[in-house]
Image (cartoon, rainbow, N blue to C red):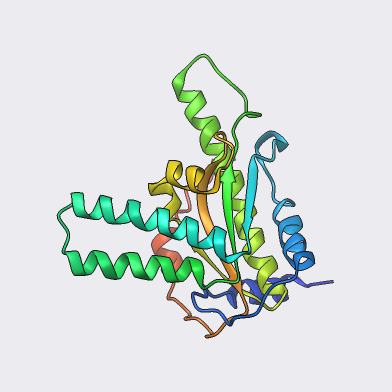
């Protein structure tokens, strides 16, 4: 059994890996990762997460090309430098196509509760997104436990319809992120974290 101290150390060892070795990942391993992802908590236990697994060159290239075209269009509309746009598009394309596996993490809100007012419906939508994000964190840690590297790409949030169309996903599946997975070609960097004193507030306790 993993002790609390070992678990904290394990979490602290996770790194975002962006470069991978060219080694395939067995489908059984991918299924173990996704099984771990589905053990996350979710609002009302509705389990709104959905996963599209891209482990072939064609699907990854198709997605990378479509997302790159949208990225280029958006940045050009912003008036950005053409060379900077080219570099950004090339970097995005390489990150997606060079990963042995890309998992598109989506949210499907059809089973979430419905309310007559926008405020609670928005909250319900955020509950589904939060639940999906917790599943993604499980996925990252499961990859680490298999000796694999992984990294989150949040770019689909800028082009959800593009992702849906490129992969022919159900319209109700809204892409939240990509998770690239593979055997790490580099160890990744230990990024600094904000001091706890900067991010924690301890409200006064109620008088007894």
Q: Residue at x 54, y 75 (%)?
A: 15
Q: Is residue 179 visible?
A: no
Q: How many marks?
A: 0
Q: Position of residue 33 (x, y in %)?
A: 72, 62
Q: Position of residue 85 (x, y in %)?
A: 25, 64
- Seen in the picture, residue 97 relative to 71 is either above or below; the reply is below
Q: Residue at x 50, y 78 (%)?
A: 19
Q: Quadrant of residue 49?
A: top right
Indicate left or right for 157 with 28 as reference: left
- Seen in the picture, residue 90 relative to 42 is either above or below; the reply is below
Q: Position of residue 172 (x, y in %)?
A: 57, 34
Q: Quadrant of the C terminus?
A: top right
Q: Quadrant of residue 4?
A: bottom right
Indicate left or right for 94 with 58 as reference: left
Q: Residue at x 42, y 66 (%)?
A: 93
Front-most of 85 and 146? 85
- Seen in the picture, residue 159 relative to 31 is either above or below; the reply is above
């Amino acid at each position: 059994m993993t002790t609390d101290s070992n678990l904290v150390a394990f979490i602290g060892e996770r790194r975002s890996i962006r470069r991978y070795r060219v080694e395939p990942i067995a489908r059984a391993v991918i299924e173990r990762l996704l099984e771990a992802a589905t053990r996350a908590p979710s609002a009302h236990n509705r389990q709104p997460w959905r996963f599209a697994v891209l482990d072939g060159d064609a699907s990854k290239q198709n997605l990378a090309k479509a997302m790159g075209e949208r990225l280029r269009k958006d940045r050009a509309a912003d008036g950005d430098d053409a060379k900077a746009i080219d570099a950004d598009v090339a970097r995005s394309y390489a990150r997606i196509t060079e990963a042995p596996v890309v998992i598109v993490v989506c949210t499907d809100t059809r089973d979430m509760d419905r309310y007559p007012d926008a405020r609670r419906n928005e909250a319900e939508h955020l509950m589904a997104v939060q639940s999906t994000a917790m599943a993604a964190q499980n996925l990252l840690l499961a990859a680490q436990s298999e000796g694999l590297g992984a990294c989150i790409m949040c770019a689909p949030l800028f082009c959800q319809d593009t992702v849906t169309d490129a992969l022919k996903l159900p319209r109700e599946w809204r892409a939240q992120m990509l998770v690239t997975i593979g055997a790490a070609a580099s160890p990744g960097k230990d990024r600094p974290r904000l001091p706890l004193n900067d991010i924690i507030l301890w409200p006064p306790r109620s008088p007894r």
